[in-house]
Each structure stands twice: as C-alpha cells, then as structure tokens.
Amino acid sequence: QEYALYKREQLICYRQIITSFECFTCSCQIRYSIPEEMKKGSLIGNVAQDLGLDLKRLRSGRARILTGESPQYADLKTDKGILVVNERMDREQLCGDVTPCSFSFEIILENPIELHRVIIEVLDINDHPPTFKNRDVRLEISESAIVGSRFSLESADDPDVGPNSLQNYMLTKNEHFLLKQHSNADGSKFAEMILQKSLDREINPNLSLKLIAVDGGNPQRSGTVNIEITVLDANDNAPVFNQSVYRATVIENAPIGTYITTVNASDADAGSNGFVTYYFTNLKGGLGDLFNIDSGSGKISVTGKIDFEKDRKYEIRVGGGLDDASKVIIEVIDVNDNAPLINVMSFSSPVSEDAPTGTTIAVINVKDSDSEKNGQITCSIDSFLPFKIQSSLTNYYNLLSDVVFDRETTSEYNITITATDSGSPPLSSATTLRLVISDVNDNAPIFTKKSYSAHVVENNEPGVSIFTVSARDVDWNQNARVSYLLEDTQVSGSPASTHVSINSETGVLYAARSFDYEQIKALQLVVKAQDGGSPPLSSNVSVKILIQDQNDNAPQVLYPVQTGGSLVAEMVPRSVDVGYLVTKVVAVDVDSGQNAWLSYKLQKATDRALFEVGLQNGEIRTIRQVTDKDAVKQRLTVIVEDNGQPSRSATVIVNVAVADSFPEVLSEFTDFTHDKEYNDNLTFYLVLALAVVSFLFITCLVVIISVKIYRWRQSRILYHSSLPVIPYYPPRYSDTLGTGTLQHVYNYEVCRTTDSRKSDCKVGNAGSQNALSLRNSSCCLKGI
C-alpha cells in the first residue's frame, strides 16, 4: 500500500460551556497536509489521537463527517479513529492556480455535541508537463528590424504550482536571437526573443527555432513549440504603444460583448507597413475563452463568463507587431450574485418534551462565495417560534430551545432558518427543519366524569353489562394506553370483585352475581385508570351502582295471625253503629317504592253487605246496622295486593262472630274449624282423587281375575298329562331363603288368630329382601 505522507500542522480548540443544561459543545480545528493523487484508503491522520478522543467516544457519539454539498474526499474509520482517503484528489481540479490548496469538513459527535473542523491541504506533485497552446508559432519579421528589437512569444501553461510549475524557457541555439525571460505579478513566466544580429532576407528568408519550457519538478518535465520566422522585406519602423500598461475593470457576470478597454499603437511607416495588427501574446489557461481583442482596432471585449469568485484579476500581454508590446490589467468587480448556502451539520429530532431550556437542536453552517459585505451573513428564525439562534464560531450557528416543550400542546415544529447576506440588494436562502417532540409520560389518565352512578335491576343474570367508565390520556402511544381495574374495596363485607368485574381495556363493568335489592341496595366502588408508561400514572374515580327493586316479593300478612288448628275470631256486638271498626288487617312488603304500596280488598264474605275493607289502611268496618237476621258466623277473605308490575298478592281469612255474649259464640263456633273451605280448587282435587282410586281398583280386579284363570289352566294341563311329577312348592308358601326356586311374581298373606301362643311368620318378596318378623299379632297377606 502506498505510504501516505502526512503531517499535523495545527490544532486549535475552542470550548463553549453551556451551563443551562450542563453539557458543552467543543469546537476544534486540526490541519493535515497530504500529496495529491493518493490511492483510496491511504492514511491521512489519526484524529482520535490528535483530538484527544478515545474510540468509545467516537462510537457512542456517532462520529461522522459533514461536508455539506462538497464531495467527500475523506472517510472516518470510527473503529480505528483514523482518516483515510475516500476519493482520489487532483489538486489542479480542486484549486487550479490557487495556493495553498485545501478543503475542509467537520467531524460531529453527539451527546454532547462536539464539532471539530478538519482542514486538509493538498500538496502538488509534478504530474503535468508545461504545454503550449499551439504546436507551431509563425512570426513575420522585417529584415530592417534593428538589433535589440523584442518579439513576444507564446507562453507555456503548467497547471502545477510551486517548484513543479513552469520555471524556465530555452531557445535553440542560433546567431540572430537571444531569449529573455520575464515574470508577471502572479508569478507566471513568459519569454521574449531579442534580435542580436540583423536579418538578411536574401541570405535566410526563413528561420526555424524551438522554444522549450521546463518545470522544476523531480523528475523534470518539459514542453516544446516550433517557431517559424519569415523574413520580410524592409519595414523600417516598429509599432509603439501609447501606454506600457493599460488598466481596466469589468463587472463579474458581464454579458458577452461587454467593452473593457482599447489598446493603441502607432507605426511611422506608410502604407501597409504602417498598419498595426493587435493580438494577445501570452494567453494562459482559459483566458482566450474569456476575452477577445479586435486585431484592427485593439478593442478588448468579454467573450466568456467572468466570475469574481474564480479570478479577481487578469493580466494580458498585447502585441502589435515587431518588438513592442503592452500589458493590460483587468480587475473584476464583485457583484452580489451568490446567495448564502445553508448546511445542516447536526439536527436532533425527535427531542424529548422534558428537554431543558437551552437544549441544542441543530448546528448550522452558512457560506457565501461573495466578498466583503456581499459575503457577510446573518441567520434568523421566525420570532414566534420558541427557539433562538446563536453564533458559536464564524459562519456556525446553534439552534437552541427557548422554552420547555409540551407535546400535548404542540407535537411538532416547522422551523424555517433564513440566511441573508449584506449585499445590495441582499440575497437570502432558507431551509426548513421539521422538529418532532417525543412524548414523556407526564399526564395521568383523566376520567370523563368526576364520579359515576348507574342502575341495575335486581335478579339480573350474572355477566350482564352494567355501564362503562371512560378515561383519556393526552400522552401518546404506549403512554396513552389506558387500562382499568377495580381497587380492593369491601362491599357488604366481601371484596368488590365478587360483586362486579371490569374489562381492563374497554372499561365496561359487568355484574359478577345476581343482585338482591333486599340484601344490597347500593354498591360503592373505586375504579382505577392506569396508563402504560414507565413508571405508570393513574387516577381513581368513585362509582356508585344502585340496585333497582323488582316486585319479587308478595305482601306478608302480620295480623291477623293465621294458625293451623286454633280458631281466632273477632267479636262484633249486634248493637254497634255503622262504621264500627271490627279489626285491621296489617301487612308489609319487603320490596320498595310502588312495589311496596299495598291495597286491601274484600275478596269473599258471608255477607258482603255487612262489612267493607279500607283500600289503603286495611280496616274492616261495618257498613250497615247489624240485625238479628245476620248469621253469627261471618267469614271474610281479604286480599292484599302490591302496586308492582305485575302485582303480587296475599290473602287472609278473618273470622267474625256477630253476637252479644261469649257463650253464644262458643255454641256457634264449636265445629267451625271443620266447615267447608271456600276454595275454588277443592272440588277439582276431590274429583281427581276419586278418579285415580277408581282406576286403581279396576286395574287390581282385572289382574286378580287374570291370575285365577292362569292357575286353573295350569292345573288342568298337569292333571291330564302323562309327564312325571316334579316336586314343587305349594303356591301358598314363599321362598324365605332367597334361593330363587319359587316363582317371585306372587305375594302371600297368612292369617292367624290372636290367641296363638307362639308362632313365626316370614314373608318374602321377589329378590333377596330382608325378612319382616311379626309376633303375637295377626297379619293378613293377600296374594296378588
């Protein structure tokens, strides 16, 4: 690998301490010198060592090269901390005649921001020989030219600089001319031929010479041009310019054809010998493309694009024939024709919303190729934006935050940075940065209501949806993801989770059980909304669930008390007045509201014309005068109904004795308890029972007759057959041992007298059932 010769020439470091957020921006400058035409990958310098940075810092700070719009000729190897050649560098292409030739770029590191400028000077190598524009130069010289006459020659061009540039001219040896070398103000060299011996057209009408241009490089390079001289007949007088030096100015970007100046020379000869022809004698580089001289008038005009930023002054030698020549110096006037260029060296987006005031958002570099005021730049941003821009180094600006951000108020900013020069009129350019504010979990979820209340009807199905709570988090993404949960509270001595459940994502509350209003009338819960941030933030809300009553309980009669066997009767003397309070039916309903509103009605009565029941209070009063014809025994059926939908009811029987004395009551109420019940369903049940008993009797009768017929047929078959007799048990006994030899389809009854002393009777049935022992009694077992 080609050895890269480099040297570190300069290291300048500036540190700007920004105490507002306890970090610093370090701006350092380091310079290297390298030869041109180095191979890709050749070493330039060890920036980590020269800047005092370790390799970890290069990697953690994401060190990188910022070149703006310029080609990236160098590459940073962060793993080694070195700069290497990234692209072949041609000094002549980079800088032309400008010396020294250098280019610069910035190395930027983040967290905290560090900005280091690297300047690389490209050293010239002798890779170009001097060259002439033309291979042959033709001169016409009069034989009457006097000794000492000067003749300007075409200059050679060598794009190299310094010692590698054009150093000397040499002329082939001859007896007529000597070579004299001159230097221009910019250091460029040109040559003149001086006539040292008169010419004689009759002896030598033509002369051939060679002009050799050599540089000072190692190895040395050269270029050659042939000079063909034609000796003319006598022309006694040479042209003489009226000025040795002409000075003129031209505005850059002047249109083609713009007049610059006119050179003038006079010749004392008459006729054609006195006619002067003007020409440029030592055009260098591309001067021939920029300017033109009229050969007859000497008027110089613009033929190409004049750029102040490329060349600020031009020197041109003008010849008029024979030995005289003049110099024209053209100065270029700068025009504000270049708008500032904005390069964003570093831009941090997104920025956390909790970033402190003074946080560096971006580092900006501005350039203007114009000169003086035309190249002086100021940067600005819109005044309403919460940012400020400060100059850190020449042509470098820091964009800083001026407030504490709130993403929930403004989630992003479009920051337009404007760079304006001081020209007249001023030129400006702008670039817009889109800054995104990243979210921080700084907001807890907020419920849509301060408290919630809902209703659920009792006797609900478990799992039914009750209602939904909702909370909103103004943060973003994961920080705004809300989940719901029940706080660990007690409801009627048991955890809230045994009564209700909540969907953690939707906030829907579900009943975990069937509620009973008579046991729990309300649930007081606390729901927690928690976001997904780290650490999470939360808020609570109170939730009250009211159980709505259903008419699921019938009224209960408290008085009169209904007893099973005893009789309770209210006694009413026959002498009472109309409206006499006999008694009061008292009932309650454990439901609530209209479901517990009770009304009383007289459903049945022995004499409806004698009593009435208060609709609201249940009071039983007489509605007419009691007479002797009225029966002593009065039976009232009172129905108590609630006001639910549908309504529920209860009935109570009130026995009333219409009598003046207690003995009269006793005689009438002796068998009162055996009276027929006033029940509409009683007849139906009696008829049904009679039908069932009749059906069972007929069924038993049919079965008995069938068995008798079957036995009679069996005995007849055995009697008439000739088959051997097989012993069998008589049908009047049962197999009590459970051997299974007897037929089990029969049951038997044995009757004994009560005066038998001692006897046992075992009765068995099908299978192996336990035996029942009966003593000192009579039992009857009827076969079926």
Image (cartoon, helix red, strand yellow):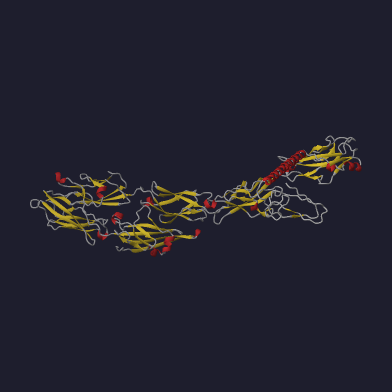
- Asked whether residue 514 is in view, the answer is yes
Q: Quadrant of the N terminus?
A: bottom left
Residue 260, x across and y down, in percent: 27, 46
Q: For the point 37% across and 50% down, which residue is it?
A: 374
Instruction: Decide: is 400 above or below 9.
Output: above
* Depth check, front residue: 308 or 765: 765
Point out the residue furthest to the front here: 722
Q: For the point 79% across and 51% down, which residue is it?
A: 752
Residue 81, x across and y down, in percent: 38, 62
* Depth check, front residue: 590 or 733: 733
In the drawing, does residue 470 fall left or right of residue 267?
Answer: right
In the drawing, does residue 529 fall left or right of residue 35?
Answer: right
* Depth check, front residue: 534 or 213: 534
Residue 408, x across and y down, in percent: 53, 50
Instruction: Decide: is 131 above or below 624.
Output: below
Instruction: Decide: is 465 above or below 759.
Output: above
* Depth check, front residue: 590 or 49: 590
In the drawing, does residue 756 fall left or right of residue 366?
Answer: right
Name the quadrant containing residue 572.
top right
Name the quadrant containing residue 689.
top right
Residue 213, x across and y down, in percent: 20, 57
- Asked whether residue 17 is in view, the answer is no
Picture mark count = 0
